[in-house]
Image: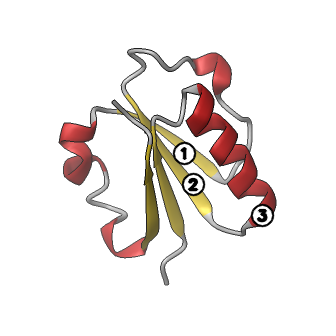
Amino acid sequence: MKNYLVVTGGAGFVGSNLIEFLLKKTNFEVISIDNYSTGNKKNHIKNKRIKYLKSDTKNIAKSLKNYKSKIYSLFHFGE
């Protein structure tokens, strides 16, 4: 079952607002990938349905290897 949404740049303004929206409007789990070059941990949303990963998008395949078959969609706001 594909039950994950991935948001790159999830610790930035746009990404964190998208995550908040997704949590309200869907039942998906959310994986946020950010390298924190401009994003900030202050933008993290406290919710058990979110997993925050510190990584670059150039390493995205490696970062998501354990979730690959479970990802429904990816929103790219990193970089």
Q: What residue is pinned by disc 3?
A: 25
State yes or no: discs 2 and 3 in contact (Cβ < 8 Å): no
The secondary structure type at the circle numbered 2 is: strand
Measuring from the top left, give residue 25's x and y in whole percent: 78, 63
State yes or no: discs 2 and 1 in contact (Cβ < 8 Å): yes
Q: What residue is pinned by disc 2?
A: 30
> Going from the N terminus, do you reach mark 2 or mark 3 first?
3
Hey, which quadrant is residue 54 in on the image? top left
Measuring from the top left, give residue 68's x and y in whole percent: 31, 67
Q: Circle 2: is it few (<14), some (14-19), or many (20+) Cα within 10 Å?
A: many
Q: Circle 3: is it few (<14), some (14-19), or many (20+) Cα within 10 Å?
A: few
The secondary structure type at the circle numbered 3 is: helix
Left or right of residue 4, residue 36 in this image: left
Q: Is residue 71 depicted above or below 62 in this figure?
A: below
Left or right of residue 52, residue 78 in this image: left
The image's mark for residue 51 is 1
Q: Amino acid at mark 3?
A: Lys
Q: Amino acid at mark 1?
A: Lys
